[in-house]
Structure formats: structure tokens, C-alpha cells
Amino acid sequence: MGRFSFSPSELWQSLSYLGQTASSSRMETIHSIFWQSRLPRILAALCVGAALSTSGAAYQAIFRNPLVSPGLLGVLAGSGFGAALSIIAGFNPMLTQICAFLGGISAVLISILVQRILGQNSVLILIFGGLISAAFFTALLSILKYVADPESQLPDIVFWLLGSLTQISSTQLAMVSLPVSGGILGLSLAGRLLDALSMGDDEACTLGVSVYYIRYSVIAVATMLAALTVSMAGMIGWVGLVVPHIARVIGGTSNQRVIHLSAIIGAIFLLLSDDLARCLSPEEIPVGIITDLVGCLLFLWVLASSREISL
Amino acid sequence: MTLLQARNLRYRRQKTVILDGISLSFHQGELTALLGINGAGKSTLLRLLLGLMPPDEGDIFLQNKPLKAISRKAIARYIAYVPQEHKAVFPYTVEEVVSLGRLPYIAFGQNLSLADKQAVKQALDYLNIASLSARPYTELSGGERQSVLLARALAQGSPILVLDEPETGLDFGQQLRLAVLLQKLADEGYCIVATTHDPLRARQIFSRAVLLQRGRIIADGAPRSVLTRSAIEALYNIDENIALSWESVE
């Protein structure tokens, strides 16, 4: 799939030529494209989709709200600002990704800081902190877009914000795969605790859960996952919101199952969305646009077919 | 045997004193009702007893150990909480909700053991709600949800049950069934503490009544001796006309 097409048998042939000198130039090209471009991108789509979905599922359980997505505490706005700042400063793509990650983490820390300043530990105040933090970084991002060079910098910022898997390298994938896998595993192990937390703080506490420790640990891990995805692929919307709902429709409400299924479904969803992004038109469409379009239709289907949302 | 003890508790919210000089002991097999008007400090007292927040002064002892020195998990093995029935956000099945009662016995990331599953089944059977196991908790009636929360508390295997206005949202029949159940549990040795707004029912089913007024205990003892007409009139600011109708109910 993609602009340079080859059949599965050709791919198999090229793989079997690995290490041999007598290979045709087409086989070498296929070999090179598969290992250096296609495979990293496939793995990146799986990794980003799984991370966004599990992050969304964890956020929904922690905040006891099925309409919450990983952007709740401002991580997406903060990452967007970090990336735009880096683009304007002329940093290379790797530094842009690091800035995006740091921006996302900073936004969530500001949300928590607002909660601390107000001196309350309630989830609602934390969400308000997230709203303030997101609005603040969105405003800063708008300023950067306003001052960016409209010929060179602004298109880069806009393209990055639309979300795309084109920039991912094997090195970067190797760097993030460990924290992403660890984060997903950690959240899946915390499934029962998330079930208790989604019943309310008092109930979770009387069921033996150290509410504040678990809540902030889960927020830290879910935020790290979301920030890593934004640093790799820009803003990819709807995955973190919709996929956990699909997981609940398929496998029930228990968060042990929801986290596992979200990871699998999210990975497949983003892989298919990325395939569509590459094949729908001669020029590649940012995958964020595809997930927005498909995501809202899927969400409509979930709302129509499930009884799960109780607002 | 004394299971839970509060010694000279004092709790303030900003400058307002919510509870003052509260000393109480709760014993095995005792069915205690906490009564008082809204704002008298009943819910705050429950929260302190559950360890959900610390008192400003005084101490709480769980089997003679200071509550603040006991881990959350260990407290949960001794004290189970039954909140007012509520509608959860996510549609967990009844079995999943009751299974949460086994959390204090499960290590991080671990699944329910056979013994845990057995405890869940026993709790469902005890409350006669095994047939509801696969039903979403969100689709149950108020009375059924209350039963599920009680089953979760029983699955927790804790000798102390703390209930926050358990009769709220229940119809007359459900209230009667709940009363019988609480008496049965107390007879089996559970130490039960419940807030209630119904002094008449408290007289009938509880073995002890504690009356709270403006954060202080004004009476503590057998319900028939504590919940007298004059005490209830004073506690709830009931004037003579309403008191007459209460008398007719009695």
C-alpha cells in the first residue's frame, strides 16, 4: 500500500534476499522501502494508536467521565505550542518532538498547579485547571501562528498540528517504544483500581485504594503516553475518545478488558486510518483529518448502539 | 468486644466547628443508628470513622490500633462502607461491582483467586441477587442497587459495616427488608453503624441510638430510652401540631 506498490510475494522474496549479494535492484528497493519506511511507519501507527487509546481509557476512568479524552488536562495544547515554538526557532524534527513532549507535560503540570493553588483536591478543580492550561497554551499557540512566517513556518506548524506519521524514524520509534509499552502495561495492571476509582473517591478509598497516589500515577502515565504520541505524530484527534467506547461495546466495562482492547483496537484503527491517509489521494492527507472524519462517525455509531453513557 | 473507638474527636471546617468532643465505642453485634438534623455532623462523623479524613483533634482506634497508623488496604479489611445508592457512570455488571469488594485482598495487577470468587458468590447469594449478576448496575432499581452495594460490603469480609442513610430511595417494602437484613447481620456478629433520618424505624430495629446536635452527642443508649417523644421533638425542632401526627404514627 502506498505510492510504490509491491505484492506480498515480492516482499517475501526481498526479505529472503536479506544478506545475499545477488539481488535485483527492484528487490533491493523493496527491501529498503520496507525496512526504512513502511515497517517503521506501520509500527508507529500501531504504537501511537495503542498509546492514545489506552491513555483515553485511563483518563475516562480516572475522571469518571466517558466524554473525556487525553487532551483534558491541556496535554495536546501544550504539545502543539512546544512543537510550534520549535518550528519557529528552526530546530530539527527531533528537537521539535522533544519540545512537543515537554510542552505537553508542562501543560498538565500547570493544571495540577492550578489545583494546588486553589487548595483543593477535587477532580472537578483539576479539570478546571486543565481548561485554564489548555486555553493558555492555545492562546500562546495562536500568537506563534500569528508571528510565524506565512511562507515557510506557518505551513509546517499547520501540517504538524493536523497530525501525521510521515516524520517518524526508526531511531525515534525505538526510543519511544519502551516507555509506550511500559505505560500500556502499567495501565492494564491498574485496571481493577481504575474500576474502583470510577465509582468515586470515597468508595475507592474504603475499598483499600490509595486514591491520590493511584490517581496521580495514572494521570502521569496516561499523560506521558499522550505527550509521546503528540511528539511523534502531532495532534491526532478522536482516537483517545472513541476507541475506549468501542472497547466497552465489545468487551464490557471492566477496565482490565477496556485497557487491553483499547490498545488493540486503537492500534488497528490508526493503522487503517494511516493507510487511508496515504491512499485516498495522490498527495498524502494528514492522518489527523482521517481520524477526525472516521472518529466522529464511529462515535455516532457507538452512541446509537450502546447503552453505556450515563450522564 | 470493642471494634472501633472514637476518642474526643473534634473537627472544624474553616472556623465552623462541625464535631466536638465525640467519644464513642462500637462493639461486635451492635446495630447503631446515628441521628440528627441535616448539618448535625452525622456524615462528617462517618467520614472520620472510615478514615476518609483525619480529625483536627482526638483519635480513632481500630481494634485498639490508631486508625492513622493503619494502611488503607488494612482498614478496608476491617471496615466496609455502604454509600447512599447511586448511579455509576459506567455500566459495570453487578458481579463486577461486588467483585470490587475483594480489592483489599488482591495485589496490584492480580486477578481474583478462587477464594475471592467464592466470597463474591456467597455475598450475591446472601442478598438474593445472584440472578442479577450479569445485569448492568446502572439499569437496576434503587433498592436493587442498594442490595448490590451491601453485597459488595459483605464480599469485603469486614467485621464493621458503615452505612450512609441506607434507606434513601427505598420503597416501604425495601426498607423493611433492609431492616430485617441489618438485624440478621448484627445477630451474626457484624458491628453496624448507620446514619438515618427515621427515628421511628430506629426505635424498631436498631440496638443503639446516638443523637447528634450541632456536632455534639446529646444522647446515646438503647433506642427506646433515647428516642423519646420529647427528645425527638427537641432534636428535629418539631412543633406540637406535627408532634401529634408523629404520635398517631407511633
Image (cartoon, rainbow, N blue to C red):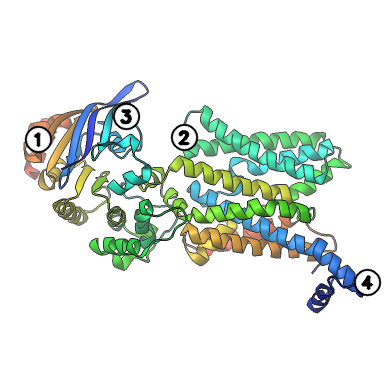
Q: Please name the amino acid that badge 2 sits on.
A: Asn
Q: From mark 1 to mark 3, how far is it between C-alphas?
A: 27 Å
Q: From mark 2 to mark 1, how far is it between C-alphas?
A: 39 Å
Q: From mark 2 to mark 3, how far is it between C-alphas?
A: 17 Å
| Chain at numbered mark 4 | A
Mark 1 closeness class: few <14, some 14–19, many ≥20 residues within 10 Å: some
Which mark is nearer the camera, 4 or 2?
4
Q: From mark 3 to mark 4, how far is it between C-alphas?
A: 78 Å
For marks 4 and 2 on the same chain, the one whose residue lies earlier in the sequence: 4
**Viewer-nearest residue: B211 or B25:** B25
Q: Please name the amino acid that badge 1 sits on.
A: Val
Mark 4 closeness class: few <14, some 14–19, many ≥20 residues within 10 Å: few
Q: Same subunit under labels 3 and 4?
A: no
| Chain at numbered mark 3 | B
User: Which residue matches tag 3?
Assistant: B55
User: Which residue matches tag 1?
Assistant: B226
Determine contact: label 1, label 3, CB under 8 Å: no
Q: From mark 4 to mark 2, how far is it between C-alphas?
A: 63 Å
Q: Residue furthest bottom?
A: A9
Q: Same subunit under labels 4 and 2?
A: yes
Left or right: residue A213 versus residue B160 is right
Rendered residue at 54%/36% (across/down): A128
- Check residue A121 in the rendering and tell me which mark sits there, or answer none: 2
Which mark is nearer the camera, 2 or 1?
2
- Residue A285 in percent (x, y) is at 79, 58
Is B65 rendered above or below residue A3? Answer: above
Left or right: residue A64 versus residue A129 is left
Which mark is nearer the camera, 1 or 4?
4
